[in-house]
Amino acid sequence: MTLSLKTGSRLVVATHNPGKAVEIAALLDARYETVAAATLGLPEPEETEATFMGNAVLKARAAADAAHLPAIADDSGLSVAALNGAPGVLSARWAGEPRDFDEAMARVHRELDARGAAADAMAWFTCALAVAWPEGPVLAVEGQVAGRLVFPGLGTRGFGYDPIFRPDGHAHTFGEMDPELKHAVSHRARAFAKLKAVLF
């Protein structure tokens, strides 16, 4: 089977996060008719893998098989050097249920303060992307972007931990950046560049 998707194909975005669904659709350059897993009423699988790549594959596989359509899934998160890579794959769980990323960012700050490492803490975002075909193969790639954490957070754009993350080489946090600029330099953009090289 050729690992490609015909322009105009229907593609499930395997997420229940509205912000992430919009960002993924934008990064796909409107090549596909995207529909979010939440819109289709698909259940969220439990993320049981220990890596971003493992969770992305798990989510894409579950959505593709349930919807009988190709599906794309993202698993991404923030890793902080001084916290030994935490929150990492637990990034969303640090936000609790329902998701409260203000609390998640406050927790990162508290954890760093306890270690005396909150000032200019080194961190990186990772994004793993997986595309699965129903009962078929899975294609997976990963991208990262390094930066520093700033407290308090700045900006109201983006989602998740974006307000506290300033990527290296830039003067603004992801929360302050114009979405087009963020889409050009983010971890998700780097993963998508790898994915597009195969799919397009």
Image: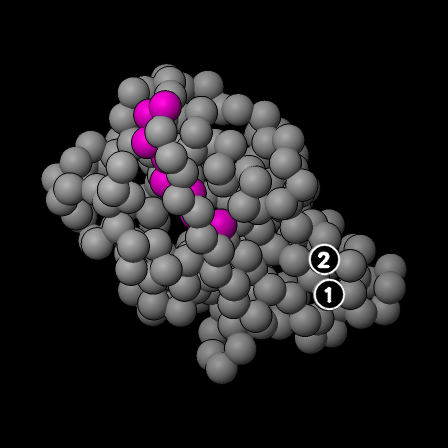
Q: Nearer the viewer, residue 57 or 45?
A: 57
Residue 53 in percent (x, y) is at 54, 46
User: Which quarter of the figure has residue 92?
Assistant: top right
Mark 2 highlights which residue? 85
| Residue found 34% across the figure and 62% down from its top | 193
- At x 67%, y 41%, the residue is 50
Q: Position of residue 164 (x, y in %)?
A: 58, 62
| In the displayed structure image, the side of residue 35 where residue 91 appears, left or right | right
Residue ID at (38%, 35%) = 137
Give the spatial CA distance, label 1 vs label 2.
Answer: 5 Å
What secondary structure prevails in the magenta region?
A: strand
Using a 10 Å C-alpha cutoff, classify the residue at mark 2 as few (fewer than 14 neighbours), some (14 to 19) or many (20 or more). Answer: few
Q: Are marks 1 and 2 in contact (CB under 8 Å)?
A: yes
Which element is circle 1 on?
A: helix
**Residue 37 shows in this picture:** no
- Judging by the rendered image, the residue that carries numbered circle 1 is 81
Q: Which residues are magenta?
A: 128-135
Q: Is residue 96 above or below residue 167?
A: above
Amino acid bearing label 1: Ala
Amino acid marked by disc 2: Gly
